[in-house]
Amino acid sequence: MKQTLLIILTIVGLCVSCKKKTENRYVCKQDIICPAVVCVAYWSNLHFAVTDKTTGRDLIFGPNATLTAADIKLYIKQNSPYTEVPFLIDSAKRKLYTIRAADTMALQIKNEALQYLLVKKFCSDECCARTAVEVVQEGKLLIADEQKLIRFRY
């Protein structure tokens, strides 16, 4: 009887300890295959907003905004130096975005020190483009929402 109980407890212990840990990740839709489309350019998109790190309040488009788009600079790493890339403003959707995202980027807010960004995951769910959906900002993983918007904390 003691051996049976010991075997059961061992099996239950193994099942509990081997349970796969689920992580918060962005689930891409199925990648689109566009055989009839010839891509002359391939866009790497990044849709983003800047929020307060404690309250989550939008600092550019929210009420009592404390930043403007002119306070923000986005850089991509090309070979060795960082190069500033332009971004567009979509006031209706309350976001900033670029079509020139890269795996390694940097964000600068109000001439402060660069905040380093590393894109961990892109989704390719439209022809000739991919969108960053998981970005590490200074060691913290940020996951895009349903609209593929990354909220950088400041």
Image (cartoon, grey):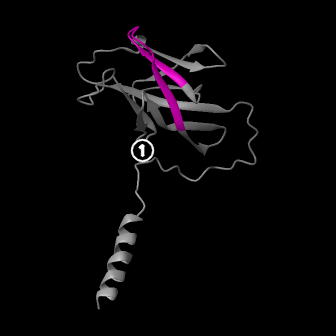
Q: Mark 1 highlights which residue?
A: 146
- Residue at coordinates 40% horizontally, 57% vertically from top-left? 21
Judging from the image, what secondary structure is the residue with disc 1 in? loop
| Residue appearing at x 23%, y 29% in the figure | 55
* Position above or below: 80 against 90: above
Mainly helix, strand or loop, the magenta region? Answer: strand
What residue sits 60% from the left and 43% below the top? 124
Give the class, few, some or many, for how many residues have Cα within 10 Å of label 1's Cα (few <14, many ≥20): few
Q: What is the quadrant of the N terminus in the image?
A: bottom left
> Looking at the image, is 77 positioned above or below residue 25?
above
Q: Is residue 138 magenta?
A: no
**Left or right: 36 in relation to 144:** right
**Magenta segment:** 105-120
Q: Amino acid at mark 1?
A: Glu
Classify the position of the C terminus by image quarter: top left
Q: Point out the residue furthest to the bottom here.
A: 1
From what the image shows, is residue 49 above or below residue 143? above
Residue 108 part of the magenta-drawn span:
yes
Q: Position of residue 105 (x, y in %)?
A: 53, 23
Q: Image point 39% across, 24% down: which residue?
A: 91
User: Residue 125's x, y, as percent?
Assistant: 58, 46
Place of residue 24 in the rendered image (x, y in percent of width and height, measured from the top left): 40, 49
Q: Position of residue 38 (x, y in %)?
A: 76, 39
Tally the numbered discs: 1
In the rendered structure, the answer to whether residue 94 lies left or right of residue 55 reads right
- Residue situated in front as seen by the camera: 58 or 37: 58
Frontmost residue, 131 versus 25 = 25
Residue at the front extreme of this rendering: 2
